[in-house]
Image (spheres, rainbow, N blue to C red):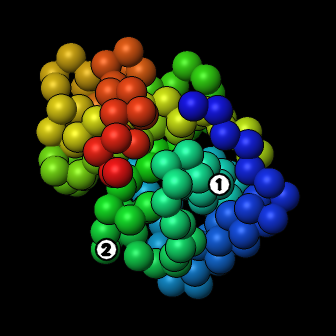
Amino acid sequence: MKVTLEWYELLQAALCGVRRHIEALHKGLPDKHGFDSDGWGAHIEGAAGEMAAAKSLGLYWNGSINTFSKGGDVGALQVRTRSKSNYDLIVRHGDSDNDIFILVRGMAPSFDVVGWAYGRDCKKDEYKQSYGGRPEAWFVPASSLNHISLLLNMLR
């Protein structure tokens, strides 16, 4: 499902991403999972991906700060924003087996809300990989995800 954020939605997501990054700097929190790239951009694009997922599902996105250990990104849903159109859904060891993970691809303002899966369905040996010297995780291809319309029906 293609989603384009309006300028005012993008502004809200960008401000949220900036606040998240500044909070991390203020608290001295290192980037997670071996990530050593552009933290500013990652926080902004991640927040924009969350907004895109919420928009596609007709859900409220609160743009919360410092709540990453409490609930999901959009309600109880976990959103994983990936910048490239061929990137897979990433699920890590600390992620809950019972959470729903949504793959969103793209960069602001245009995103593709690709599909979703439960954490337990993502944690299969065939999906386990380690890229760029970063910790091992599960990378689930889009072809193995549930269609986003199924999630829409479940939410109704």
Question: Is residue 97 left or right of 57 when viewed as pictured?
Answer: left
* Residue under the image location 44 percent in, 61 percent down: 74
Q: Position of residue 120 (x, y in %)?
A: 15, 39
List the single residue furthest toward the bottom: 26
Q: What residue type is labelled 1?
A: Ala
Q: Where is residue 26 in the image (x, y as percent from the top left)?
A: 58, 84
Q: Is residue 150 above or below residue 85?
A: below
Q: What residue type is labelled 2?
A: Lys
* Residue under the image location 44 percent in, 26 percent down: 88
Asked where in the image residue 77 lies, by quadrant, the reply is bottom left
**Which quadrant holds the N terminus?**
top right
Residue that badge 1 annotates: 48
Asked if the residues shown at circle 2 and circle 1 are in contact, with their CB atoms under 8 angstroms apart, the answer is: no
Q: Can residue 89 be seen in this view?
A: no
Q: In this view, does 113 lie above or below 68?
A: above
Asked where in the image residue 131 lies, by quadrant, the reply is top left
For label 2, the crowd category at 10 Å Cα-Cα, with few meaning under 14, some 14 to 19 and many 20 or more, is few
Q: How many marks?
A: 2
List the single residue furthest toward the right: 7
Q: Position of residue 64 (x, y in %)?
A: 51, 76
Residue that badge 2 annotates: 70
Which of 66 and 109 lies nearest the eye of the viewer?
109
